[in-house]
Image (cartoon, rainbow, N blue to C red):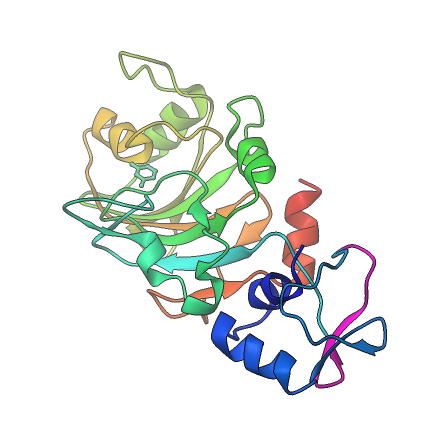
Amino acid sequence: MRIDKLIANSTSWGRKEIKQLIKKGMVSCNGKIVSDAGFHVDETSDEITLSGERIVYSKYVYLMLNKPDGYISATFDKHYRVVTELVPSQYAHYEPFPVGRLDIDTHGLLLLTNDGDLAHRLLSPKSHVPKTYFVRSSSPVTASDIHTFAQGIDLGDFTTMPAKLVPLESDTNESLVTICEGKFHQVKRMFEAIDNEVIYLKRISMGNLTLDESLPEGECRPLTDEELQNLIGE
Ligand code: URA
């Protein structure tokens, strides 16, 4: 890989600035100053430094987004704003995409990455990765609803797998729902099936990745090493 590309992929410097840094002799490979921006390096073994600081190359980016209302889970759309517009510019070159979909009006945890294998593993119907949502519904959740969710609900086109419904003690119009599938409008349809209506929906976890409640809505941050290791080991 070209050294300027590696630096561009691993730092927030732009290509033009990187050329300048190279011209100024601030970049080295295995201890030798590099003067050519097109110099080829082995990103897995060469030690690249910029102003004496080692550059750690990473092929993938893993971002946690606290999705707000009004964005669709796509990378491009003619009519609607898309979640990738919320990705800070320093990560844009990775071209991350959303792992799965949240409805336009659903809030909360959305993982964005360019790691197709991980996305595939998390989304595969065979993986049954649990997803937990906070739900505010128009009517209170009852003991019978809990039972219905646990049994699985026939939604016409498919029967849901057993789901966990836990009303919050403070307010039974609020509950936590855990499903191990990810069918279109699934939580909303499950509430419809018990003659209730979802009026606010927020995903709070996916597998062992939990939404960082200190992350403001509309913002993204890279996963910590621990979050990533837990997720990859999923
Ligand atoms: N279930 C829904 O109904 N909508 C979502 O966005 C996610 C799960």
Q: Position of residue 89 (x, y in %)?
A: 41, 67
Q: Position of residue 17 (x, y in %)?
A: 51, 79
The picture quadrant for ligand 1 comes to top left
Quarter of the image for residue 19 reads bottom right
The residue lying at 70 percent from left, 52 percent from top is: 229
Start and end of the magenta stretch? 44-53
Residue at 47% over, 58% down:
93
Judge left or right: residue 162 versus residue 156. right
Residue 181 x %, y %: 45, 28
Apparent side of residue 175 relative to residue 25 in the rendered image (left or right): left
Corner quadrant of residue 183: top left
Extreme residue in the left direction: 79
Label tally: 0
Q: Is residue 51 magenta?
A: yes
| Residue 9 percent coordinates (x, y) | 57, 62
Q: Residue furthest front?
A: 36
Q: Residue at x 52, y 47 (%)?
A: 114
Tell me the chief SS of the magenta region.
loop
Vertically, is 11 above or below 57? below
Residue 120 part of the magenta-drawn span: no
Q: Quadrant of the N terminus?
A: bottom right
Comparing 65 with 170, the one in front is 65
Near-viewer residue (70 or 204): 70
Residue toward you, 17 or 35: 35
Vertical side of 119 occupied by 54: above or below:
below
Residue 14 seen by the camera: no
Frontmost residue, 171 versus 61: 61
Going 56% across and 21% down the picture, which residue do you hit? Answer: 126
Q: 226 above or below 136?
A: below
Asked which quadrant contains residue 84, the reply is bottom left
> In what quadrant of the picture does the C terminus appear?
top right
